[in-house]
């Protein structure tokens, strides 16, 4: 079977410029390129497409459906400290879990939720 070489999440955001700046300044992602109505960002192997959809239901109104990804990292404590410094909003503090992960959760400027974890 074919191997998956990259995963890219696609998110609807109400204000593309504001959201792109958030992902760059708070989460440390690099802008790969832009197209009309789209921003393509990356942080290591984590890829993201932001599409401007001002009339879409805001992620804050989606409840548990606002979760969109779990990103495995090599040093969750270091990333957590960095995100504390850049002003990320945390939904879960850094903690070691019974399932063998050290993880934390954040909520983006648009209300999307994301988990970061490190295998213990």
Image (cartoon, helix red, strand yellow):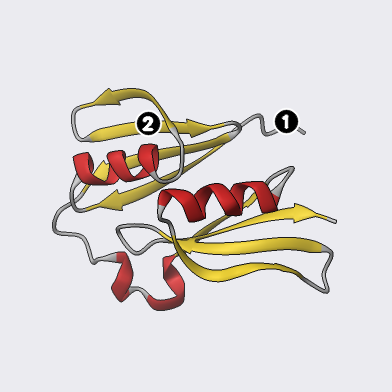
- Per the model, the C-alpha gap separating discs 2 and 1 is 24 Å
Using the image, determine if residue 102 lies above or below residue 43.
Answer: below
Please state if 51 lies on the left or on the right of 95 as rendered.
Answer: left
The residue at the point 38 percent across, 57 percent down is 108
In-front residue for pair 52/24:
24
Residue 29 position in % (x across, y down): 45, 35
Q: Residues within 10 Å of mark 1 (few under 14, many from 20)?
A: few
Look at mark 1 in the image and give the residue it sits on. 2
The residue at the point 66 percent across, 29 percent down is 5
Using the image, determine if residue 33 lies above or below residue 93.
Answer: above
Residue 112 position in % (x across, y down): 39, 61
Question: Split into 4 quadrants, where in the image is the N terminus?
Answer: top right
Residue 92 position in % (x across, y down): 56, 71
The residue at the point 44 percent across, 39 percent down is 48
In-front residue for pair 86/119:
86
In-front residue for pair 82/36:
82
Using the image, determine if residue 64 lies above or below residue 49.
Answer: below
Residue at disc 2, secondary structure = strand
Question: Split into 4 quadrants, where in the image is the C terminus?
Answer: bottom right
Using the image, determine if residue 20 lies above or below residue 56.
Answer: above
Look at mark 2 in the image and give the residue it sits on. 40
Q: Residues within 10 Å of mark 2 (few under 14, many from 20)?
A: many
Residue placed farthest to the left in the image?
55
Please state if 80 lies on the left or on the right of 60 as rendered.
Answer: right
Residue at disc 1, secondary structure = loop
């Amino acid at each position: 079977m074919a191997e998956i070489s990259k995963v890219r999440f696609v998110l609807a955001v109400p204000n593309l410029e504001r959201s792109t700046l958030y992902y760059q300044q708070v989460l440390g992602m690099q802008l790969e390129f832009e197209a009309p109505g789209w921003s393509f960002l990356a942080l290591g192997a984590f890829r993201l497409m932001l599409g401007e959809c001002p009339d879409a239901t805001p992620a804050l109104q989606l409840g548990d459906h606002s979760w969109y990804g779990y990103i495995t990292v090599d040093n969750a404590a270091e990333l957590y400290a960095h995100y504390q410094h850049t002003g990320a909003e945390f939904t879960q503090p850094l903690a070691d879990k019974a399932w063998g992960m050290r993880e934390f959760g954040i909520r983006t400027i648009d209300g999307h939720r994301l988990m970061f974890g490190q295998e213990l």
